[in-house]
Amino acid sequence: MKTNPQTNLFEGSRRLQMNESIELTIQSLHAYGPKYNYWCMAWSGGKDSTTLVTLIVWLIISKKINPPKKIYIMYADTRLELTPLFYAAQTIMEELAEHGYKVEVVMAAMENRFLTYILGRGVPPPNNATFRWCTSRIKIEPMQHALEKLVGDLGEKVLMLTGVRQGESAIRDARIVLSCSKNGSECGQGWYQETLPKALCDTLAPILHWRVCHVWEWLKHWAPLPEYGDFSTELIADAYGGDEAEELNARTGCMGCPLTDKDTALDNLLKKPKWAYLSPLKRLRPIYRELRKPQNRLRKTGKEITNERNKQRMGPITMSARESAFNEILSIQDEINEAAELTGMPKVFLLNHEEQEFIKTCWANNLWPNKWTGEEPTADIPMDTVYADGSIQPLIQFGN
Ligand code: SF4
């Protein structure tokens, strides 16, 4: 059969580039890896860190790099992973176990999870860089604690391998971009590089120089082959919405992330008929928006004795708003799971049974964030203006 020489040429050069990328990765591991007895990988389940984990395991089993004494793989479960990515991670975990690598699941403590923190304690959803409590609370701190425990048990520093990637510019520019949305990186990724304490680990980003097309090439065409580890990584591409998402250099984060303008990953996913049953997840962001409105939050009157400059700041979410958001989230969950039951697709547990019970206990205990009692007025009630110096401008009353 006649072959198309152009296709062959293209594939040939792609293979060459892939081999070059892999070779640079091997060189970085040869240079830094042997200095440490133990390596650790922070795996988010996204495209870059999944590439890292499967690549490193393949490099070891194919004897292209020498393994350390032991590798620890820590999967960061935020509880809000995009459903197909979460299930892809579960499958890949089983495959890693077949290769002899057991994965530790790292999750925030019950009170610190995204939804329990909001609905149980009443802290408003994060909204921008000044009130972005989520990345540290649900991603960084749990990983830090797991690492502290590991290093404490081992009694020595580990080499933390991260999936931070800067594409071709990495070769020209050695700076690490920390923003969660730059260059299609996953939220939290760069933060691992920046914030994990130097006393516990040194970090290495072995795929820093990989271009996004190489990541997809690895996940879709290389890693699924038996000679490259036989991993179900093609499920990851599906989770990003397939070819279209690849072109956009897509990123994923928590479902309904209130810090992004659009649910790009979810929107791409919903275009695929088999995942369309997840469409009720589109209602998450409006719930978070609603919870931030003045009528659903308390406000300090400013007449309390404090040394805060913003004396009348808006604060936590009222009990009734927490309860209605809780019910709405459960109805989203029920709707999805009824459809999942009919079609045999994966179910979604935005709030599992323990989390529901925990939230109800918080309500029963009248739990409020520090410095709030629940006695404050709601933020939509007009009140005298109190300035930072304590001076008061009375509310103008319009009488008859
Ligand atoms: S993806 Fe969004 S909600 Fe999740 S941790 Fe990152 S910024 Fe927060």
Image: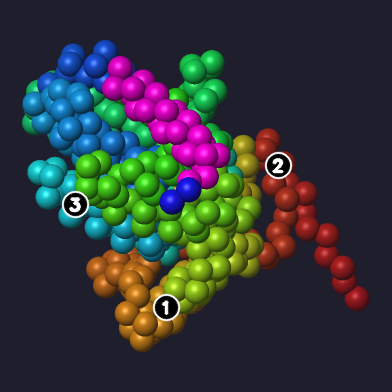
Tell me which amino acid carries mark 2. Answer: Tyr
Check disc 2 and report the residue beneath it: 387
Color style of the picture: rainbow
- How crowded pointer 1 is (Cα within 10 Å; few <14, some 14-19, many 20+) is rated as many
Tell me which amino acid carries mark 3. Answer: Glu
Name the N-terminal-most of marks 1 and 2: 1
- Judge whether residue 191 is colored magenta: no
Check disc 1 and report the residue beneath it: 336
Q: Horizontally, is 326 left or right of 285 in the view? A: left
Give the secondary structure at mark 3: helix
- At a point 49% along the width and 22% down the height, the residue shown is 170
- At a point 45% along the width and 71% down the height, the residue shown is 275
Give the secondary structure at mark 2: loop
Residue 323: image location, x then y, percent: 45, 74
Residue 338: image location, x then y, percent: 38, 84
Name the N-terminal-most of marks 2 and 3: 3
Q: Is residue 72 above or below residue 176?
A: below
Check disc 3 and report the residue beneath it: 95
Of badges 2 and 3, nearer the viewer stands 3
Residue 231: image location, x then y, percent: 26, 50
Task: Name the outermost residue toward the front.
Answer: 1
Span of residues in magenta: 3-27
Which image quadrant for residue 44?
top left
